[in-house]
Image (tube, grey):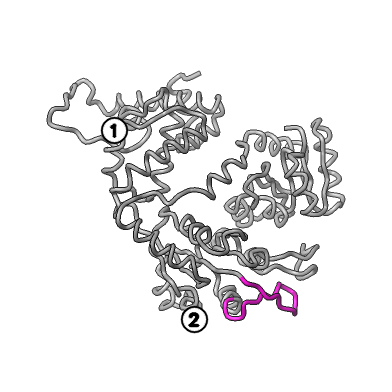
Amino acid sequence: MHRVLLLGPDDEARRALHLLIDRRGLAVVAATELVTAQKHIAAANCDLVMAPPELALEVARAPSRPPVVAILRTRDAVMSKSLLDAGVDDVVLEPLDEVAVSLALHRAAALPKRSAVLVGELIGTPIVGSGPAMEKLRATIRTVAATKTTVLITGETGTGKELVARAVHASSPRAAQKFIAINCAALPEPLLESELFGHVRGAFTDASRDKTGLFVEANHGTIFLDEIGEMPLALQTKLLRVLQESAVRRVGDNAEISIDVRVIAATLRDLEADVEAGRFREDLFYRLNVVPLQVPPLRERPEDIAQLARYFTKRYAHRHQREVALTDEVVEALSAQTWPGNVRDLENTIERLVVLADGAVIDTALLEAVTTVRPALTSTTPVDQAELSIKKATRSLEQDLIRRALRVTLGNRTHAAKLLEISHRALLYKIKEYGIS
């Protein structure tokens, strides 16, 4: 890391941070406006962006960008979690000192770089599966895409609701316009209101400039409201007015801005039950539920699992620059699972297999070592009774996995712990227990 972009007001706090980073021997680029910062980012003129929460969110929304650190003025655990959930890479608290800045820079340098190739890959991700359920879904998408009507996508977590929303947009006359997605559960109410509808300067504390909301940004395109069932009732009322009037009023403003935006919403909640319980507005539900799209869980389309598994293997092999393939036995074992986390669950499992594979083949031995998936035993499968000790097998598997994870992460124990899905403290204990260097 060589260059840090400081985005935000040119005040005493930023000047102090500038000096702290200077003392670390890094170049500092300063910008007070988002447009200026975006030019530096587009020109690859910075390796890290540090900004107040609102501006950090704006930068984090870009898929191809350097790591983003949000600078908070007060300790707020809810705000910190919301920022991280919304895509910000790290959060630091003012007043900043040498230690805090050093740690933030170290953590940012350890983050994987984002690539514009991955952006295209994400946007171009196909809806994989040739079974009857997915063929029916594709046909509905094609029919719905030709209209402007509001769509409500429902389905369990991990089924690919945003992927369906992107497919509707990409197949529509609006395909050349913006597709903007926001998770309504990721931000607290005041920040969500500002993100969606915008605000004028001075509308609230820290509103130092006018902000264009996402509805205005998505004008002539599509806005995707994920987890719409988590939207607070007060914002539901404001959203209903936007849908009825095709106009947005920014926070603190008296004037309305006319918009032409297609709205696609998604939820895993039972909104009809929420309406009955008073948690969701009935009139908003009917406005959103003009065309319902139900995404089937993976257990209801097992015929697609093999195709998905091979697709994800190819995708992550390319991403991690590996040459690996699944054996037929592994595909058969994966196809026999119910996958409670649906497609995302299968995808995460495949990525773990690809990353931890030693050679060019992902076989049942690796499958058993890094997942809970077990190939079915046949009556002719030989069993060595000496290998039936769960205790011995568990220790052996743990040692092997820890060594693989440390090798993949080049010895970074924090990243290895995440890959192994255990705490950092547990990893340190096991490294010591097994004498792993």
Earlier residue among tags 2 and 1: 2
Q: Position of residue 370 (x, y in %)?
A: 38, 33
Q: Position of residue 417 (x, y in %)?
A: 50, 34
Amino acid residing under circle 1: Asp
Number of the front mark, 2 or 1? 1
- Residue 157 colored in magenta in the image: no
**CB of mark 2 within 8 Å of CB of mark 1?**
no
Q: Is residue 237 left or right of residue 322?
A: right
Q: Position of residue 315 (x, y in %)?
A: 47, 38
What residue would you read off at disc 1?
328
What secondary structure is the stretch in magenta mostly built from? loop
Vertical arrangement, residue 391 with respect to residue 82, above or below: above
Q: Residue at x 31, y 52 (%)?
A: 131
Vertical arrangement, residue 147 with respect to residue 406, above or below: below
What kind of element bears circle 1?
A: helix
How far apart are the two marked residues, 2 and 1, measured between alpha carbons?
51 Å
Vertical arrangement, residue 226 with respect to residue 425, above or below: below
Classed neighbour count for the residue bearing mark 2: other residues with Cα under 10 Å, few (<14), some (14–19), many (≥20): few
Q: Is residue 150 left or right of residue 205?
A: left
Figure quadrant of the N terminus: top right
Q: Residue at x 50, y 37 (%)?
A: 418
Amino acid residing under circle 2: Asp
Q: Residue at x 72, y 38 (%)?
A: 47
Q: Which residues are magenta?
A: 243-260
> Which mark, by number, is residue 283?
2
What kind of element bears circle 2?
A: helix
